[in-house]
């Protein structure tokens, strides 16, 4: 599930790296889609903190559900905490703790701030470290709300996915769901159930305290 969490962290929000120009000969992105994504990015940058509840749904190539999990994401500056069934990823801006509940084991590593490292604050880097082409599809309406649909395709064709669909709340200018289409046929849908911003989040939220995990095995990779 570690890979899926990383994908989640990447897909929840958008940063300007997504909007870089594509190399010549590979087509052009839709300027209207860019306006939508730019607006999402600009709004996200105004948040001091973010707390979100999400659902991850996995389907196979036939569209049959393979499982559903729920989780939470908290962010504050370069700090973040991701909780999903059986796993926690905690970062205080310098150190990253990855806890596996089933093994009662935590791996400790130093945060890599290079462009290739995946963090919620450096979205669409590393796993999504190349540019995308993006177009706007037809809007969809559910529950009286209008959602703008953006389809992205990676310029780097060696990626394990070939398409990503993002739904953006037209009024709130926020991403409500992301669907990743992998080449092996699997599909991962990440839906934001609720999100709050600029709430007070104590800094100790982003520190792993072994005292709260009796008997935990610490594997220090630093």
Image: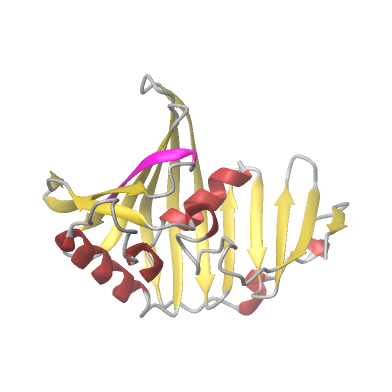
Check if residue 161 falls in the magenta segment: yes
Q: Name above or below for residue 204 compared with residue 171.
A: below
The boundaries of the magenta stretch are: 160-166
Q: Position of residue 169 (x, y in %)?
A: 22, 58
1 sits left or right of 193 in the view: right
User: Which image quarter: residue 197?
Assistant: bottom left
Q: Could you tell me which residue is drawn at 55 percent across and 49 percent down? A: 5
Quarter of the figure that contains the N terminus: top right
Q: Position of residue 65 (x, y in %)?
A: 42, 25
User: Which image quarter: residue 91?
Assistant: bottom right
31 sits left or right of 75 in the view: left
Q: Could you tell me which residue is drawn at 47 percent across and 57 percent down? A: 10
Quarter of the figure that contains the C terminus: bottom right
185 sits left or right of 219 in the view: left
Q: Position of residue 201 (x, y in %)?
A: 54, 76
Q: Is residue 170 visible?
A: no
Q: Main secondary structure of the magenta part?
A: strand
Q: Nearer the viewer, residue 164 or 82?
A: 164
40 sits left or right of 59 in the view: left
User: Which image quarter: residue 22?
Assistant: bottom left
């Amino acid at each position: 599930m570690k890979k899926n969490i990383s994908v989640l962290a990447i897909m929840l929000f958008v940063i300007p790296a997504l909007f870089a120009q594509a190399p010549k000969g590979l087509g052009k992105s839709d300027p209207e889609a860019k306006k939508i994504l730019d607006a999402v990015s600009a709004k996200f940058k105004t948040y001091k903190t973010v707390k979100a509840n999400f659902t991850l749904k996995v389907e196979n190539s036939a569209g049959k559900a393979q499982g559903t999990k729920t989780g939470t994401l908290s962010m504050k500056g370069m700090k973040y905490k991701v909780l999903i069934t059986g796993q926690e990823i905690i970062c205080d801006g310098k150190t990253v703790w990855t806890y596996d509940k089933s093994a009662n084991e935590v791996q400790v590593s130093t945060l890599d701030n290079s462009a290739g490292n995946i963090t919620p604050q450096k979205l669409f880097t590393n796993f999504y470290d190349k540019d995308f082409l993006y177009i706007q599809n037809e809007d969809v309406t559910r529950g009286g709300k209008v959602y703008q649909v953006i389809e992205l395709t990676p310029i780097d064709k060696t990626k394990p996915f070939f398409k990503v669909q993002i739904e953006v709340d037209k009024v709130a200018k926020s991403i409500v769901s992301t669907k990743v289409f992998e080449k092996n046929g699997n599909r991962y849908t990440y839906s934001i159930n609720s999100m709050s911003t600029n709430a007070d989040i104590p800094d100790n939220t982003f520190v792993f305290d072994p005292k709260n995990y009796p008997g935990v095995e610490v594997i220090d990779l630093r």
